[in-house]
Image: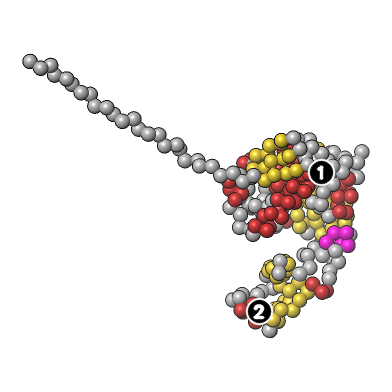
Amino acid sequence: MAIDDNAFIKLNYTGKVKETGDVFDTTFEEVAEEAGILNPDKDYHPMVLAVGSSQLMPKLHEEIQKLDIGDKQTVEIAAEDAFGKRDPSKIQLIPMKEFKKQNIKPFVGMPLTLEGNPGVVRTVDGGRVRVDFNHELAGKDLVYELEIVEAIEDNEEKIKGLIEVYYGNPNLNLDDVEIEFDDDVAKIKLGILAGFDQRSSQEVTLSKFRVAREAYENIEEVEKVQFIDEFADESPAETEEEEEIPEVLNEDEE
């Protein structure tokens, strides 16, 4: 029985480049460590996936929808259905003087971002630097080892899963996230540390929008999502000390 479009599942996966077998992403810590791609800031566990969402590439979603809870399957994704073919127009020659202006010494393999587009330095030749803005997996056929662990029924767990995928703030602790449902409104408090975010307000707003959109498009009971920033004075309340009234002794007059 195929998985329903609006279902939420827990998914384990390992993604490899078909030609070389190199692992580029996984939900298993031991696999990441063996492949040399272990990220100490990442929690390795099954990811929460809204099956009908845009979390993964469309072709991979199609393959997942053919499976059932508990299934394990290896699927191949052609380059054109994955990260696309390599585009020669995304390879640029940048004058060395542009790097010198910013006191940057480019080297082969150096990651950089230009006008919001991530790229990597391919060659440094005299006065020119060749930068490739293609996705690192562009032009490569991929293999995914998939395991559908379980279905998720609890709406709070669904939304926390979306927050983990889309919000992307290392200061965020999901245990501190509070979610309250008021009729068809999901009210989300991310916790005080979520405010310590080094991204621009535009990026943070976009992350929240992605969480909200996937929630109201894929959770039947949710029509609206509110993010609530709450700050409270955690210092202990000051109490007035009781004024000590001295005892007065009255002497009888002789």
Q: What SS does tag 1 mark?
A: helix
Please tell me how crowded label 2 is: few (under 14), some (14-19), or many (20+) other residues with Cα within 10 Å: few
Mostly what secondary structure, the magenta segment? helix
Where does residue 27 sit, x and y in percent of width and height? 74, 48
Span of residues in magenta: 79-83
Residue at 68% x, 57% y: name it: 203
Where does residue 123 sit, x and y in percent of width and height? 72, 76
Relative vertical location of residue 108 with respect to residue 33 in this rendering, above or below? below
Residue at numbered disc 2:
98
Asked whether residue 81 is drawn in magenta, I would say yes
Q: Tell me the quadrant of the picture where the C terminus can be found.
A: top left
- Kindly tell me whether residue 30 is visible in this rendering: no
Asked whether residue 148 is drawn in magenta, I would say no
Taking the view exactly as shown, the residue that stands out farthest to the left is 254
Residue type marked 2: Glu
Specify the label residue 218 is tagged with.
1
Mark 2 or mark 1: whose residue is earlier in sequence = 2
- Kindly tell me whether residue 58 is visible in this rendering: yes
Residue at 77% x, 44% y: name it: 215
Residue at 62% x, 41% y: name it: 176
Q: What SS does tag 2 mark?
A: helix
Closest to the observer, 49 or 33: 49
> Does 124 sit left or right of 77 as displayed?
left
Residue type marked 1: Asn
